[in-house]
Amino acid sequence: MVIDIHDLAFRWHEGAPSVLTIEAMQVTAGEYLFIKGASGSGKSTLLSLLAGVTTAGTGSVRVMGQALERLGSVQRDHFRADHIGYIFQMFNLIPYLSVVDNVMLPCRFSARRRDKALARGKDLETEARRLLRHLDMDHPELHGRSVTTLSVGQQQRVAAARALMGSPELLIADEPTSSLDADRRESFIRLLFSECREVGATLIFVSHDASLEHLFDRTIDLAAVNRSGQDMAAV
């Protein structure tokens, strides 16, 4: 089991209403899971908990068998760097780094991912270029450029390659296709599946766009499992 949530309750500060109340949620290894929900439904909060950026007030969030609430902040940072790749909605690429340097970035923070990347390629740059090619960025003349010169679609692929660098066991994608048209969204997701399959990663893909859910193994409607949202809707 890659993710195992039990009796989760999260609020931003004491006395505030609960944002997330999830009795149980599990994700198996190698699964491609689609989580849908409207803006404000708690999707980003859930991802922060899964990545160990925040911790549960009560209950447990286990990722790869590790109860994240039992780790200190530095330990969670190391765990995230070693095991989780994250594709942000706005990509969060480093503007003063080249395309290849952005992709290699996770290996600066995780010796584990560095070693796994080197096991797949003769050096980190070779592995970064391989990932870019697999994600439809087979344009070597772009690889040395600043990411600020790229189109939105190209930046998206760089962000995905960075998240996959060093074969993390869990890949989290937060609305990464929101700025693309429908054809490009599906094409990107299929490329993402292909690369996840090659490295054996589990994919958590979050979006408000329900038209994408047919591509995935399973869908969770956050509004259906988050009792906080149900309670607020009933007021």
Image (spheres, rainbow, N blue to C red):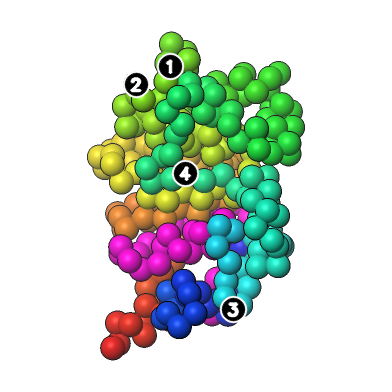
Residue 146 shows in this picture: yes
User: Which residues fall within the magenta stretch?
Assistant: 22-51
Can residue 219 be found in the magenta stretch? Answer: no
Which label lies toward us, 4 or 1?
Answer: 1
Mark 2: give few (<14), some (14-19) or many (20+) Cα within 10 Å: few
Q: Quadrant of residue 182?
A: top left
Where does the image place residue 31, in percent across and percent down from the top left?
A: 56, 55
- The alpha-carbon separation of the residues under discs 4 and 3 comes to 27 Å
Say which mark, if any, is on residue 58.
3
CB within 8 Å, label 2 to label 3: no
Q: Amino acid at mark 2?
A: Thr
Instruction: Please identify, in this view, whether the residue under mark 2 or under mark 4 is nearer the observer.
Output: 2
User: Residue placed at 68% from the left, 53% from the top?
Assistant: 74
**Mark 4 and mark 1: span between their CA atoms?**
20 Å
Left or right of 230 on screen, residue 77: right
Tell whether label 2 touches label 1 (CB within 8 Å): yes
Residue sitting nearer the eye, 176 or 54: 54
Vertical arrangement, residue 89 with respect to residue 108, above or below = below
Indicate the quadrant containing the C terminus: top left, top right, bottom left or bottom right: bottom left
* Residue found at x 31% / y 27%: 151
* Residue named by callout 1: 145
Report how far apart the C-alphas of labels 3 and 1 lie in the structure. Answer: 46 Å
Drawn side of residue 130 relative to residue 187, left or right: right
Q: Quadrant of residue 163?
A: top right
N-terminal label among 2 and 3: 3
Secondary structure state at the residue bearing disc 2:
helix
Residue 8, position as x, y percentages in the image: 55, 76
- Please name the residue that numbered disc 4 is placed on: 87
Q: Is residue 35 above or below residue 123?
A: below
Residue farthest front in this picture: 14
